[in-house]
Image (spheres, rainbow, N blue to C red):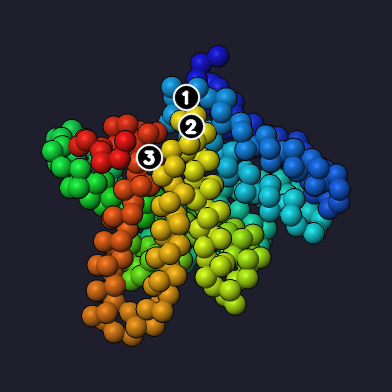
């Protein structure tokens, strides 16, 4: 079997297995917990079936498994019964990782769809064009610092553009989910950035890690636990793709956790004064630029052509 077919089989299996088990998973009790635990273990390791020689395919298949892992965890850890049709749609729903987000999403209003969609398409096209131009022209091939800066800007445009386009599409389809990214790169502090970036996963982490770890009453502990879990998830996701642990994702997310904790006291200042807000943006961009070297180092393992300049990290 080719790597492409194997990756497709793993990705489809990540959705088919929960659907087949849905009649059991819908009811709370011991059987749900036992079968759910088996399903979680399968999803945790299924990405290793894709050969290490195809890291991009492995990452795509592992991402599908991780997506369903988070959904399954939410179902198994709940103390409620699900209507079967509702659980099936939750498993298939592309924009909800928790039951609360899923149920709210169906009642969200339709507003400013076309404007957001057009803006998102423009940002997405600009980001992809910037990457294509940089790779073709070989610009900044002599300087990793400048190459990393260029790819960071392109990543920001692609992420914001794809998120806005996706949100507009979901609205048109009647799926009123929250935007996965909502102006994250205009954030004035690291804390604000991570409130705006990847909000679907943030909601899941808030429910299953942050609040159980103490929430706002234990802010330091809860925040660091949240970023520790996020780092472990990302570390394992990349490990499934390249069949070894790189060790870059966990320190990256721990650094982000420390940055969030350190910037929390500054939230009120940057919101009240315009000059402080712009200074905060510059410092936040600098913080993300420096720390994201770790994040993109793993990305370069999956997509080796990501950088044209020699990388700083092995």
Pinpoint residue 61: horizontal percent, then vertical percent. 53, 33
Label 2, on which residue? Answer: 244
Return the residue found at the far top.
Answer: 1
Q: Residue at (39%, 65%) from the top-left corner? A: 259
Label 3, on which residue? Answer: 299
Pinpoint residue 155: horizontal percent, then vertical percent. 32, 49
Label 1 to label 2, Cα distance in Å? Answer: 9 Å
**Mark 1 crowdedness (10 Å alpha carbons): few <14, some 14-19, many ≥20:** many
Res. 118 image quadrant: bottom left
Judge by depth and name the residue closer to the eye, 220 or 150.
220
Q: Secondary structure at mark 2?
A: loop
Pinpoint residue 170: horizontal percent, then vertical percent. 51, 53
Judge by depth and name the residue closer to the eye, 44 or 202.
44
Pinpoint residue 247: horizontal percent, then vertical percent. 44, 42
In the image, taking residue 258 as reference, residue 38 lies left or right, namely right
Label 1, on which residue? Answer: 52
Q: Secondary structure at mark 3?
A: helix
Name the quadrant of the C terminus: top left
Label 3 to label 1, Cα distance in Å? Answer: 14 Å
Q: Do we see residue 265 in this rendering?
A: yes
Q: Residue at (28%, 55%) from the top-left corner? A: 289
């Amino acid at each position: 079997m080719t790597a492409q077919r194997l990756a497709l089989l793993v990705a489809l299996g990540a959705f088919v297995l929960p659907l087949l088990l849905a009649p059991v998973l819908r009811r709370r009790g011991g059987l749900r917990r036992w079968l759910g635990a088996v399903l979680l273990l399968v999803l945790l390791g299924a990405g290793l079936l894709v050969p290490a020689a195809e890291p991009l395919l492995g990452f795509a298949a592992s991402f599908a498994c991780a997506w369903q892992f988070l959904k399954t965890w939410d179902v198994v850890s709940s103390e409620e019964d699900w209507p079967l049709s509702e659980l099936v749609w939750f498993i298939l729903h592309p924009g909800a990782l928790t039951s609360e987000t899923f149920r709210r999403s169906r009642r969200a209003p339709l507003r400013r769809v076309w404007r957001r969609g057009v803006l998102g398409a423009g940002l997405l096209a600009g980001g992809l064009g910037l990457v294509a131009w940089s790779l073709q022209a070989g610009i900044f091939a002599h300087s990793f610092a400048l190459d990393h800066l260029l790819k960071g800007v392109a990543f920001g445009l692609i992420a914001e553009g794809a998120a806005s386009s996706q949100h507009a599409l979901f609205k048109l389809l009647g799926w009123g989910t929250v935007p996965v990214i909502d102006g994250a790169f205009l954030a004035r502090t690291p804390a604000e950035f991570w409130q705006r970036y990847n909000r679907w996963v943030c909601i899941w982490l808030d429910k299953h890690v942050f609040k159980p770890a103490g929430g706002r009453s234990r802010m330091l502990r809860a925040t660091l636990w949240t970023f520790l879990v996020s780092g472990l998830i990302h570390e394992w996701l990349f490990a499934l793709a390249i069949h070894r642990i790189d060790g870059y994702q966990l320190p990256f997310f721990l650094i982000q956790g420390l940055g969030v904790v350190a910037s929390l006291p500054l939230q009120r200042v940057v919101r009240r004064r315009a000059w402080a807000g712009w200074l905060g943006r510059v410092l936040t961009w600098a913080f993300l630029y420096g720390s994201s070297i770790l994040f993109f180092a793993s990305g370069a393992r999956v997509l080796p052509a990501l950088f044209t300049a020699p990388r700083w990290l092995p």
